[in-house]
Image (cartoon, rainbow, N blue to C red):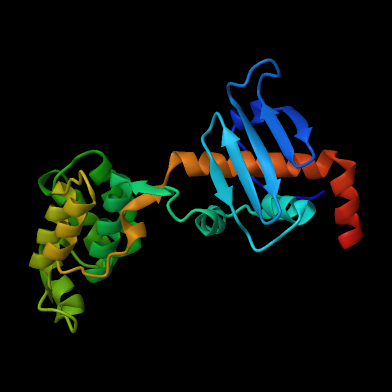
Amino acid sequence: MAWYPVQFSDYMKKHIHFSKVQENTWLVQSDPQSRCEAYFVTILPHAIVMYGDYDGVIVKPHESGNGNLISWMADATTLSYFVEKVHNGNQHHECMEFDEKICDETILTHFMDRFEIDYDLKPFLKKAMDDGEDYDDIEALFDEKLALLLGCHCDNLKETYNLKFAHKSRYNSYEVNFDNMIQMLTDVLDASFENEWVFYDWMQDHNFYDVERHDYSAYTHQIKWQHECLLWWARHVIETDPEYQIKLGDAK
């Protein structure tokens, strides 16, 4: 069967031992002699439940019956879609966690959008952030790159930038001009976030108020792994169990 391509991890590919221990329950193991690095999957009338060595998760899509649920899981390749159905089964399942790299990416994008900095400069600025450089470290090269993009000489970079981009914001008192752009770039390079509250304060101090949860969070390692486990199990069942192959064939 031709699946939507998924790059399963090498660690996932160790789980090659599948056992149907009850009519609606499977055991997936990396070592058939051990329950370590193993997990169970049980199909309920309207939900999929995973439990065992990798903690538990309930997934509740809008499907019912073993065949439909397994088929749904085998095609649930998008992590955000999977998480939506996890929240249907248990709204308190932890799926997101604070991630400083997401914060860095967010403030850099907001800075570039506010001051209309060409995205060709983004890799250069992101590397400067990752390397812990401050504005003094990159000033000469930044001026050179920005001047090249604006088609001017470094000596009249400030004048050219202001002529092209300077304006008073419609949405707040923040004025877009070369000096404020350099000040905020300095703040971006100096920023450090230990939690979401520091991030929120930084955003508000710089007149950004439309911050959503995804701006400082990433999917947890646990939910990404559970998603991969269930995809791995569901595709194996459909590809190897004649009962579900027949059902899928009849449904086409």
Quick check: can you spot residue 252?
Answer: no
Q: State left or right for residue 170 relative to residue 47.
A: left
Between 225 and 186, which is closer to the camera in this rendering?
225
Between 26 and 193, which is closer to the camera in this rendering?
26
Quick check: can you spot residue 244?
Answer: yes
Q: Residue at x 50, y 57 (%)?
A: 87
Between 202 and 147, which is closer to the camera in this rendering?
202
Spot occupied by residue 127 in the image (x, y as percentages of width and height): 29, 44
Q: Residue at x 87, y 61 (%)?
A: 251
Q: State left or right for residue 185 relative to residue 243.
A: left
Q: Quadrant of the C terminus?
A: bottom right
Q: Residue furthest bottom?
A: 170
Q: Residue furthest top?
A: 33
Q: Residue at x 71, y 19 (%)?
A: 32
Q: Is residue 35 above or below residue 160?
A: above
Q: Is residue 117 above or below residue 225?
A: below
Q: Quadrant of residue 112?
A: bottom left
Spot occupied by residue 53 in the image (x, y as percentages of width and height): 55, 28
Spot occupied by residue 106 in the image (x, y as percentages of width and height): 29, 57
Q: State left or right for residue 194 relative to residue 53.
A: left
Q: Is residue 175 above or below residue 227?
A: below
Spot occupied by residue 15 in the image (x, y as percentages of width and height): 67, 28
